[in-house]
Image: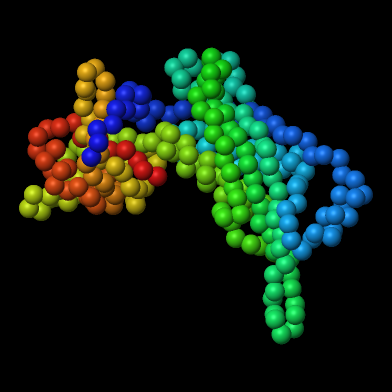
């Protein structure tokens, strides 16, 4: 396995909670609709993509951004601006604004019954929104990411509103997953629980319900070292939480790298774990 320098990641205070104030969602207004464009849309009703008035869904998109952030491990969202006394200069208060660049539906004609020649129109929706995280003190952009929900992310449904709802739900999940990868949970293996021959089978970690850990959570096991004054980590295995035993302790099953994990623990290496999802 390659040794990867991760000084920025490991230098962060472990599992610090970061607050994100979600502010404005902007959008480009839809072009004026003419008689010809309406007729064209009607003629193409059986198949094609229809652009939607973005302004109608700005609040719904903003709610999904707030929802996605609030469901992450380490980010907590607030709706609107900070009060002056709430802003901290330690990087733990961010704000987010966003630009909605696309929301549209694709529709097609689907055969329901070949013998009776009955058909129906079904829909999927697409969404594209760019979210920018900024430091609340300096206004510096911490992260800018574009989240796209495409035809491949959703199933066909019978109404355009249902399709948009599905796409919004998918958008919220993509936002949550992205920021969970960006701000993962970290823990240390505090004790080996059980072993077999030369392999570690179970371990205890100092992470529990207080940090939204859950049964089934997968985590990478790494050895942390300092090389030439820089922090580095090397992945040696994977574990899965099987039992939450308290606010700051969980039992985990070793899924990969049992021999390497046991060897590292026996040597007194600095063994840490990082959430994978």
Answer with the quarter of the image where residue 118 lies.
bottom right
The x and y percentages for residue 15 are: 37, 31
**Measured along the vertical axis of the image, is residue 148 above or below residue 18?**
below
Q: Residue at x 54, y 34 (%)?
A: 145
Depth check: 250 or 235 in front?
A: 235
Q: In the current view of this chain or complex, which residue is farthest to the bottom?
A: 115
Residue 88: percent from the left, percent from the top? 49, 17
Q: Is any part of residue 149 visible from this angle?
A: yes
Where residue 125 appears, x then y in whole percent?
66, 52
**Quadrant in the rendering for residue 58:** top right
Q: Position of residue 246 (x, y in %)?
A: 30, 42
Count of labels in the image: 0
Q: Quadrant of the N terminus?
A: top left
Quadrant of the image for the C terminus? top left
- The quarter holding residue 249 reads top left
The answer to whether 34 appears left or right of 161 in the picture is right
Q: Nearer the viewer, residue 3 or 184?
A: 3
Write the residue at 76% across / 46% down.
Answer: 52
Seen in the image, is 222 located left or right of residue 174? left
Q: Nearer the viewer, residue 216 or 248?
A: 216
| Residue name at image x 23 percent, y 30 percent | 224
């Amino acid at each position: 396995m390659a040794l990867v320098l991760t000084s920025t990641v490991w230098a962060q205070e472990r599992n610090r909670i970061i607050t994100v104030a979600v502010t404005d969602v902007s959008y480009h207004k839809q072009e004026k609709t003419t008689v010809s464009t309406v007729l064209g849309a009607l003629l193409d009703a059986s198949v094609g993509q229809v652009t939607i008035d973005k302004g109608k869904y700005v609040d719904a998109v903003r709610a999904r951004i707030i929802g996605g952030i609030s469901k992450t491990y380490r980010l907590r969202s607030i709706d609107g601006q900070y009060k002056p006394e709430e802003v901290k200069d330690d990087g733990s208060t961010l704000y987010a604004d966003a630009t909605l660049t696309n929301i549209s539906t694709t529709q097609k004609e689907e055969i329901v019954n070949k013998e009776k020649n009955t058909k129906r129109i079904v829909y999927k929706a697409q969404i594209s929104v760019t979210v920018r995280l900024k430091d609340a003190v300096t206004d510096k952009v911490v992260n800018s990411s574009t989240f796209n929900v495409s035809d491949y992310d959703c199933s066909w449904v019978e109404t355009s509103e249902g399709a948009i709802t599905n796409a919004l739900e998918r958008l919220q999940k993509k936002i949550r997953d992205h920021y969970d990868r960006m701000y993962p949970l970290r823990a240390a293996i505090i004790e080996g629980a059980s072993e077999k021959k030369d392999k570690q089978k179970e371990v205890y970690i100092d992470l529990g319900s207080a940090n939204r850990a859950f049964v089934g959570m997968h985590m990478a096991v790494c050895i942390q070292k300092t090389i030439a004054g820089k922090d580095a980590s090397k992945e040696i295995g994977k574990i899965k939480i099987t039992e939450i035993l308290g606010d700051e302790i969980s039992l985990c099953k070793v899924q990969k790298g049992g021999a390497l994990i046991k060897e590292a623990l026996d040597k007194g290496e600095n063994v840490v774990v990082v959430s994978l999802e």
